[in-house]
Image (cartoon, rainbow, N blue to C red):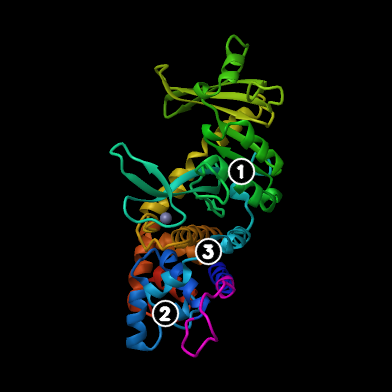
Amino acid sequence: MSVVEDLIAELGKVCAGLPDPRKGPRRDGDYSMADIGLSAFSLFFMGSPSFLAHQRALERGRGRSNCQTLFGMSAIPSDNYIRLMLDGVSPAAFDGLFMRAIEQAGPLRRFQCLGDRVLIALDGSEYFCSRKITCSQCSTRRRSDGGTEYFHGFLGASLVAPGHQQVLPLPPEFIAPQDGAEKQDCERNAAKRWLAQHGPAVAQLRPVYLGDDLFACQPIAAAIQQAGGNFVLTCKPSSHQTITEYLHGADLEEYRQIVCVRGTHTTTIYRWLSGVPLRGTADAIPVNWFSIEIRNAAGKRTYHNSFVTDLPVTGATIAELAACGRARWKIENETFNMLKTNGYNLEHNFGHGKQTLASIFLTLNLLAFACHTAASLAMLAWREAVAACGATYRFFENLRTITAYTVFADWPHLLRAITTADLRPP
Ligand SMILES: [Zn+2]
């Protein structure tokens, strides 16, 4: 069984176990929870809001569809029925599948750095905003014109690594009204919940957590260490008074690297200071501060950033630590922008629901992304099909187009058809 088939089968089992809101005994012809969950997932996996409509047409014309052959479904519910039945399901039901996708991706060598560590980037993002549509999970904010805006945010976590574009998403933690909380929820609280909830499950990967300046604070640093991790967090001088005072007048260690590419010299200057308190209290966590500055041949500064870490900083480790800290942007670029622009329709309104529907769709969308990455890492047939199309977005264009008109026997048949432009069954 291929990675894609395994992950879809596992998702089917999870969906079959979702609480069924329907009262009374099931009748023949009732849609199963597995069919309902897999239908929603298939939209995101195929990156096509009209995938189910095409499959219904195939079923009418030919008596079967790719929903059966590729997704193992027995019948295709209507869009409205899918929305109705999934609204209220807990997004956490799908958490285990993200770890399954990581296991199925195979050895994580491509993600290992700093010895045998992995990097997990944490970052917040919004996936819904409206003046009119709202549900019980919406956060609210006042706009300057006096109106109220409803929005949804989540704390995303992804495995990232310097040197390549691949990312493996982990389960999201939603920024949403919490029971018994007086203040509105925020990114930092969501990060603490994420670490408490998922930290133990990923501790075996020996994670080093990456985050922006917002996370470079004592509570998050402590939560990361409690979860068995270490950190490299962006640290801006303007928001870290104690650290800035320590740096003032301190004798910084320095390491310079001059690289010559095609006759052009670039100088990278690393500076660091070890054993600085993260904040101005007696219980402050000691951290090691470092900065990276890149200058072009004319001596002009083209990049500058600074970080704090609880890993030892030396002349031997500084360059790799800085590369790891800089990999943080990949969660924004590769995960969030990918979800928003590459046919995943993250902000497209598939329906908002009254309870958890918006969060369920976001979770399935991220899960589809995780399955794509796992497939591309573990399946030669998948990589060959992508290579034959020339670019990932073309591969998905092909996937959408040919599954609208042809029923494929299984995933190997579909991938081979894309690779060889031959639709005949093997
Ligand atoms: Zn809402």
SS of the residue under disc 3 = helix
User: Does the segment drawn in magenta span residue 18?
Assistant: yes
SS of the residue under disc 1 = helix
Give the residue number, with chain letter if any, for mark 1: 192
Residue furthest out toward the top: 249
Q: Residue drawn 53% across and 86% down?
A: 26
Contact? badges 1 and 3 (CB < 8 Å): no
Residue furthest out toward the bottom: 28
In screen coordinates, is 320 left or right of 52?
A: right
The x and y percentages for residue 425 are: 43, 82
Q: Residue drawn 46% across and 88% down?
A: 29
Q: Quadrant of ligand 1?
A: bottom left
**Quadrant in the picture for the N terminus:** bottom right
Give the residue number, with chain letter if any, for mark 3: 380
Give the residue number, with chain letter if any, for mark 2: 76
Q: Which residues are magenta?
A: 14-31
- Callout 3 environment at 10 Å: few (<14), some (14 to 19), or many (20+)? few
The x and y percentages for residue 67 are: 44, 78
User: Mark 2 vs ligand 1: CB under 8 Å?
Assistant: no
The x and y percentages for residue 172 are: 53, 53
Of the numbered discs 2 and 3, the one sitting upstream in the chain is: 2
Quadrant in the picture for residue 98: bottom right
Q: As shown in the figure, which amino acid type bears the numbered disc 2?
A: Ile
Is residue 68 something that shows in the picture?
yes
